[in-house]
Image (tube, helix red, strand yellow):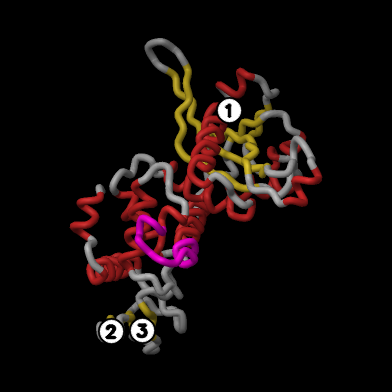
Amino acid sequence: MNLFTFTAHFGDENTCRQHFKEQRDAQGVVCKKCGSVAHYWKKDKCSYECKSCKFRTSLRSGTIMQNSNLPFLVWYRAMFLMSTTKKGFSAKEMQRQLGLKRYEPVWAMVHKLRKAMGDRDASYTLEGMIEMDEGYFTIESSEVEQKKGKRGRGAAGKQNVAVMAESTQLEDPRTGNKSSQVRYFKAKVLQSHQSNEINETIEESLDEKSIVLTDKSTSYVDIADYVEMHVMEKSSEESTKETLKWVHIFIRNAKRNLLGNYHKIKGKYLQAYLNEFVYKLNRRYFGEKLFDRLIITAINSN
C-alpha cells in the first residue's frame, strides 16, 4: 500500500474507526466478565454489549489502543509508516511525520506497537535446522559504566543478543552445489552469558525436534537436552560464512539498521527495537498485507 492508496482508504477518523471495528468483529470479542463471545453493537455508545450479562466492552478495550487518547487516524498513520518502511522511524521522527505537538504519547504508541510485534512473534517457535549465535549491540551506557572501563564481554555500551535463524539446506540437482535458504528469525536480549539463560531461550524459542548449529561456546553445553540434536563447530571464518551464515547476516544488518535510525539506544529498550526489526524481517514477503497484519496484531495485543 502506497501513500496515495492509504490516504484514499483511510482519510478521516470515522473511516479508520469503522475499519478497526470490522477487523475486530472478524477476530471476535470475548466478554471480560462472563467469557461469552456473543455481543450486540451499541452504536450510540461505540461499544459492544454482551448478550449474556450485558457487560459493555469499548471498541478500544482489550486492544493496543486501550487507555490511549490518540485518535484512530493517528494510530493508523503510525502503523502505516511502520509497516511500509524497511528502516523504521524513531519516535521523534514519527512525531514530526504525524504533526503532533507532544512527544510522550507518540513515544508510548510506537513502543506499544513494538511490544505487540514482539508478543506476536513470541507465540511462534522455530523448527527444523536452526543457526544460533550471539551478537553484541551498541547501547547507551551510563557515566558509571563508562568510568569502570570494562572491555570485551559485558563491556559498557554493549548488550548481548541471542539470534536464531531457521535455515534450510538446499542442493542444486544439476550442479550438486549446496546452499542454505533462510525462513524466520528470533532475537532475544540476554542479561548474562550463563547457560541457564541460554537454555531458557532455547526452550521457549525452538521446537524440541529442531537441530541446532552453534559454535563451541561453553554456554551452549546443555542445548542438546532441549532439542533433537545439537551440532557444535569451532568458530572460524568458514563457519561464519557457511554454517552460521544467516545469523551473522542478521546481526550485521540489525546493527546497521538500529545505529542508523536510533543512534543511541538504552539497554532496556533494545528488545523493543529488535522486535520491530524481526517482525518486519519475518514478513518481508507480505508486501501491502503487512499493514493489515499489523492491524490484527494491534487488536489482539494489550
Under mark 2, the amino acid is Lys
- Residue ID for mark 1: 244
- Counting residues from the start of the chain, the first of labels 1 and 2 encountered is 2
> Residues in magenta?
95-108
Task: Please name the residue shown 62% across and 52% down the image.
Answer: 266
- Counting residues from the start of the chain, the first of labels 3 and 2 encountered is 2
- Crowdedness near tag 2: few (<14), some (14–19) or many (≥20) residues, C-alpha within 10 Å: few
Q: Nearer the viewer, mark 3 or mark 2?
A: 2
Q: Nearer the viewer, residue 83 or 188?
A: 83
Q: CA distance from mark 1 to mark 3?
A: 52 Å
- Residue ID for mark 2: 42
Task: Please name the residue shown 40% across and 42% down the image.
Answer: 86
Looking at the image, residue 192 lies above or below residue 213: below
Kindly report the secondary structure that dominates the magenta region of the rendered protein: helix
How many labels were placed on the picture? 3
- Residue ID for mark 3: 50
- Crowdedness near tag 1: few (<14), some (14–19) or many (≥20) residues, C-alpha within 10 Å: many
Q: What secondary structure is found at the residue carrying circle 2?
A: strand
Rendering coords of residue 243 (x, y %): 58, 24
**Residue at the limit of the structure toward the right, as seen here:** 148
Q: Nearer the viewer, mark 1 or mark 3?
A: 1
Q: CA distance from mark 3 to mark 2?
A: 10 Å
